[in-house]
Every structure is written in structure tokens, then in C-alpha cells.
Image: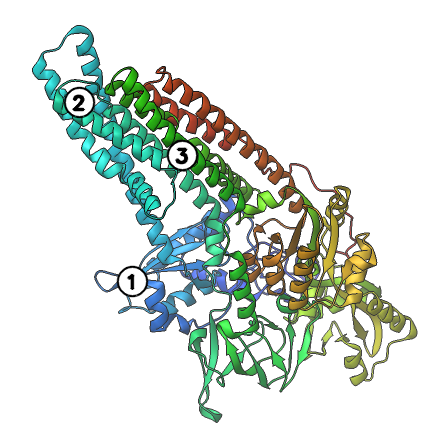
Amino acid sequence: MSTATAPEARASASCAHCGLTVPPGLVRAQETEQFCCAGCRQVYTLVREWGFDQYYRLVHQQQGQLEPARVSGRNFEDFDDPQLQAVASDVLGGDRRRTRLYLEGVHCAACVWLVEKLPAVLAGVDDVRLNYGSAVADVTWRPGQTRLSTIGRALDRLGYTPHVHQASRLQDARRAEDRATLARLGVAAACAMNLTFMSGALYAGDASGMAAQYQLFFRWFSLLVAVPVMTYSARPFFQTALAGLRAGIVHIDLPIAVGLAIGALASAWNVVTGHGPLWFDSLAMLTTALLGARQLQRSAQRAALERADSLRGVAFLEFARRIEGDGPDAVSVEVPLTALTPGDRVEVRCGELVPVDGVVLTGQSSLDNAIITGESVPVPVNAGDLVHAGATNLSARLLVRVDAAGAGTRVGALLALVQEALAQKPALLQRTDALARRFVKTLLAVSVAAVAVAWWQHSLDIGITRVVALLVVSCPCALGLSVPLAMSVSLMRAARSGIFIKNPDAIDRLQHVQMVILDKTGTLTEGHAAVARWHGRDLARDLARALEAQSAHRVARAFQHGARTALHLVRHVDNVEEVAGLGISGRLDGHLVRVGSRAYMDAAGVTPDADCDAAGEAMLADGLSPVFVAMDGHVAGVAGIGDALRPDAYDTVRRLRSRGVHVLIASGDHPGVVARIGAELGLPAADARGGLTPEAKRDLVAGLVSARKGPGSIVMVGDGVNDAAALALADVGVAVQGGMGASIVASDIVLTREGVRPLLDILDGARRLRGVIRRNISFSLIYNICASSLALAGFVGPLLAAVLMPLSSLIVVLSSSFSRTFIRPAGRVATRSVRDPLGA
């Protein structure tokens, strides 16, 4: 490449792996392929070495967009812990094990292809099957030939950091249940078809005449074919009905069980006596329809919950690097958190989460406590300082003494509170179940009276015929399906539109919303630092950005965030030196550049002029962190580092307030920063509260819930562990995209779309869903009243009842399936434009 074209090449360089723009400081002119980060370089090299170039062709064919590869560099030694493997893997025959791993970074079908090629290059791995929707891989491997940690490192090097999936046993139980249900459904359907043919022959014989021996054969053969339907396929209805009676509960399956039992026993008696109608075909079709409807309901519910299962299957923190030995013989060993005890020493490397509550023994760094306290500005830590599990180590290696691990940490205490708050059954389903139970009791009482009246007025056969028709046609299955099926289908639609409703009770509580409490960091704001304001020379800005490209510090990421093009192209970067927690220096194209805090500048003997000093003070007053940029011994600019407001925040807050909703900000960040955000959103100063600890947020929500007036609900919206307790105590908790595991577990609704605009879609979708539920319940009640009256009058027989009852359930299914509840907006949301201070 010639010198004349080098600047243009640097400006247009794209990453060979993900296709994103390569920062100018990382462009290597002597190389053909360029990479935006070390992770992309590693993954690209590995894919080429293993001969999997087809991966990139598949991505191109799908018109996919890759993200920068995130490679943790872990050893995954904790995967080899015998206790962990005993819980997280299944022993198969022939020295084989099966383990389920949740993989980060799975985004397209090409990822599935790449992961499933692992057995071709890693001895001891027999098979890998990756579910694209849940990002959970079933890995079959041989402990005698390879170790699970080796598999973990291989997946990590491909850019898919693995985590042990903790819900494996539950998935096995669900699969076994599905297999049993499908087997029962298959038996019932096969028998129903054969019984229909034999019943047709008997009806035709009654009309045109049939020899007695043939009639006898078809009647007894019908009884024989109906036995597996009643004893195997219909067993769940009898089991649940009997279990409910033992527990003193009138289950919704009781009319079905009674109807099936009476119809089967009466038909069997008619076979033995040689005269009277047979209803085996109707009972078999009824059983088939019921089993099919329930399997549809179960599938819809699980599809809606599949994404949540993958999130819940990943532990918040899984491992720690325990230091074993002293002095020169000390080594770092990865162990599960359950293996730690108070007094142990753990190593926390730069970029890792702190796994325990403890005290720093050695090291000097800064921590991002945003998920614990909501504070968006890093906190410096030194030897003797207390650290909490969940904080992110940003700068340098720390050695921490363990005081508490797992459930004993501050995070563990919050999660315990969350679990207690979530142990509730949805109120809407409770009301529907109570209505169904009252209907069942009334139906049984009417059936007894109907038998007596029909027997007295006509005959026992007519009485049994009417009672079977009444119990079958009036079975409240449609009523029972009206709420859960509508919710299940809506859950699926909501998930497709980026809204995951974990707790259906939230729909009922969203009928009237009185107040919405919004967390700031990661909810109203982007959740990561960026240059929100720049004052100074453009050249200094571009040199600072090129220098910060050499660092992984949070401030360095702030300079890089959002920048796509460079106004000044840097050719040479050398003599880079970084001082942990203070700043970075280096020589760029002959200029000595320093980027850092005021203390860093003072230590270097560089004093800002009055203009830059005033700009820094103004940024500090506005809640921004000033970072100074010096060129050749003179401060040439100052950048205000802050957490940018989400583009849709202003419009969402405005529209919420226009609906009469009281909007309140509750954040752990500095009160001045929170006040500035509140002012930008047009909120009164009293509605922007900062400096709140997780416990203070919890108390605030609890106080508002207990002191409210009127029927309105209190909605809490957040994304971090610090919001978990408040999310659990609010009437409705909403976790926004990017939220940590604790907030996801605590919340009733999880947003997987960016921004806070989906809050409005939640309210609109909940309103539409309540309309669908009211429609389903109204239809079910009207149907049951009309059908019961016709059955009692003798206008509906058992055969017609067996047809009408599934039709009523089918109408409810269609009503729920074709309802437009949660819809992704087609247009773009009106937002406030935000100028990029870096000129991107």
C-alpha cells in the first residue's frame, strides 16, 4: 500500500470478522485483514485454521450483521468440578455424558452451523445440537477423551462464552411429559377413527338391516377398541379429578371425568345386554379433542417462556479464581462459587465481575457498581476497601478476601427477597378458576336432577343419554381455556415484539396505572459511558480518541462509543503508558498526548487554562465527569463523560404523563446527575430522586404501594441488581433490555427491545388482551348456558355434544390466536436528536 493511500485505507478499514469500522489506532497497514478488537482477530484466525470458512459465507447469504466477538479468556476449570458435573450433566451409555450449555453471542443460523461443527475438530465430542431460539446447546462428550473445560475453552475461543445451563432436569421432565401426551393423543386419535367406522357400520345396519352376529361383533369390538382410550388416553382427566376430590377441590376436569365414566359404563352395559346405543366413538373423539387442545395450550405457554428459561438457566455468577498456596508457589485455580469459604482469597482480573463480598487485600483499581448501587461513575478501590459481588473490575488486578459468597452476599439477600415476593398465583386465573369451580358444582347438581326427572318421565336410558350429553356439551373447557390460552398466545406475540411477560397477573394490574417509577442508569440512559460534551480543539479530540483506542478502560470505551469515522487520521502510536485510575499518555504522530483526570494533569505538571478549567467545572456541575486532553504540555480540550439519555426517553415520558400517569425517577446515581436528567425530561425536581441505595429504593416502592389512594398500580422499571427488590415489591416490575439476572428474575415483564418506548406498547397490549379475555369468557358463559338448556331439553345428544364441545374450545382458540394484542410499531418513534460530540 502506498503512502498516499494509507489515510484512505485507514478511514475505510472494516473488521474482517464482524464488518464494523476498525479504530484508526488498531489499523495495521502491513496486513490484508483488519480487526476492530483482539476477540475478532482470535475468532477469525481460529475459524480459518479449522477450515470453517463456510461460516462467513452463510452469514453473507443470510444478510446477517455480526457483532464484535466477546472472548472471555477463561480456563473454565470450574466445569471439571465433580459436584458441578453431577448436577449439570447426564450419564449416558458407553462412557458418555450430556451437558447443556447456554452460549452468549448466538445471533443467527450461521452460529448454529459453526457450533455444531465442533465435533469435527475436538476429539471426545460426539455431538453438539444448538437451539437457536434459546441459545442452549446439548453437548454429548466422552470424559475419557476430553474434559468439559476443554470444550468450554473451544466455544469461548469461537466467541460463544458458555455457561452451565441449570434448567436441564426441568427440560427433561417437560420432554417426557410431551412424549406421554403425544402418545396418548395418538392412541386416542387412532381409536377414534376406527370407532367412527364401526359406529357408521352399526348406524347403517340399523337403517338397512344387519345380521345379528355382525352387530354383536361390531359392538364387542367397539368395546375392545375403546378400552385403551378410557384406561390410557383419558387417564389424566380421571387422575386430576380424583386428586382434586381428595384435596377437597372441585377440579375443572371433574365433569369430563364423570361424563366419560358414565358414557363408557353405560355403553359397556349396553354391549353386555345386547341393546341400547353406544357412545364409544363420541367419547374417543372427545378425548382426542381435549388432549389436542391442551397440548396446544402447553406448547404456546412454553414457546412464550423459552427465552426466559435460557436467561434463568445462567447463574448470576458461576466461578471464582481462588488463590491456593503462598508466596512464589501461589496459583490461581478456577472453582465453583459453592467451593468458597470465608477467609479464602480470590483473584479478580480486569474486566471480570467480583464474585464475592469481601475486602481488598492487594491492588488498586476502580469498580463499576452500576448493577449494585446504580452509580454510573466508577469508584476507586484500594487495599482495605469493601467490595460487593456483582461489581465489575475496570482497571487492574485485585486480590480479595472472601467474607461471603453465593446466597450470603448482598446480591444473594436481594434475590431471597425477590423469591419471596414472587411466590404468588395470578389473581386473574384465581378468579377464573373460582368461576369454573362454581359452574362445575352447579352442573353436577343439575345433572343429578336431570337424571331423576328423565328417569321418572321417560326411562333410565333417556336419563343417561341426556346426562352424558349435558356433562359433555357443558364441560367448562372453553371457560377454562379462555384466560390461559389468550394469555399464552399473547405471551408469544409479546415475545416476538420484544416484550416478555413472565407474570400474567401483571396484565390485570396494568388495567389502571397510577405511577411509573423509572431507574436512570441503563433504563432512561444508555447504561454505558459516552462523551456527552466536548470543549476544545478538534485535533485534540481525535488524538485523544486514537490514544484511548489502546486501552480497555471505561473512559477509553466512552471515547470510542458511537464513533464511526475519524476527522483526523493518526498514523503512528507509540510509547503508550497507562496509570490505573488516572489516565493514559502516548506519542501520536509526533505529539505527546495525555488524557486523564485533573489530578493526572497536575501530576504531569500540566495546568488547564481558565477556559478549559471553567468548561470542566461546568461539566461537573451538570453531572458529567471532566476528562482533560493535553497536547505537547498544554491542555487543548476537555471531554464531559456521562451516560447519554436514551433517544426515546423524552417521548415516552411525555406520553405517559399525557395519559395521567405520574412519572418518578429513582436512581442510585448522584442527585445532581439525576436532577439534570429529570429536567431534560420535563419532570418536577421533586420527581427526580438520586443517591438511593437498593434498600432505599425498596423502601420507597413499598411506601408508595402502601400509601397509594385509588385503584391505580405502581409500576417499577429498572435493569440492575440494585433494582431487584423494588421490582419485586412493585405491583408490576419491568426489566429493560440489558438487565442483569436478578432484575429479570424479580420482574413481571422483561423487555428485549431497546429503549423505554415498549412501556407504551405494554399498556396498549395489556388493554387489548383484557378485551380478548372478556370476549372469551362471555362467549364461554353464553355457550354453556345455551348448550346446557338444549341438552336438558333433549335436543342435543351425546354425539352432537361431542362435536359442539370441541367446537366451543376451538372458537376460543381461534379468538385467542387471531387476536392482535402486542404489535411491534411499524413507524419510527419520535425522538430528540442528540449531537455526537465526537463528530461521528
- In three-dimensional space, the C-alpha distance between marks 3 and 2, rounded to whole angstroms, equals 28 Å
| Point 62% across, 52% down: residue | 731
Q: Is residue 731 left or right of residue 813?
A: right
Q: Is residue 681 left or right of residue 554?
A: right
Residue 360: x %, y % from top left: 59, 84
Q: Earlier in the sequence, mark 3 or mark 1?
A: 1
Checking the image for residue 150, the label placed there is none
Percent of width and height locating residue 659: 74, 41
Q: Is residue 542 above or below residue 201?
A: below
The residue singled out by tag 1 in the image is 97
Give percent across and percent down for residue 692.
Answer: 71, 67
Quadrant in the picture for the C terminus: bottom right
Residue at 61%, 48% (x, y): give it.
753
Q: Residue 270 got which mark?
A: 2
Q: Please tell me which residue is depicted at 31% across the width and 68% down the height of the picture.
A: 146
Image height check: is 695 above or below 11? below
Secondary-structure class at tag 2: helix
Residue 568, can we see it? no
Q: Secondary structure at mark 3?
A: helix
Residue type (three-letter) at the residue carrying disc 3: Val
**CB within 8 Å, label 2 to label 1:** no
3 or 1: mark nearer the eye = 3
The outermost residue toward the bottom is 327
> Helix or strand or loop: what does disc 1 sit on?
strand
The foreground one among 652 and 30 is: 652
Residue at the outermost front position: 456
Q: Earlier in the sequence, mark 3 or mark 2?
A: 2
Is 628 located above or below residue 726 in the figure? Answer: below
* Mark 2 surroundings: few (<14), some (14-19) or many (≥20) residues within 10 A: some
Residue where numbered disc 3 is placed: 440
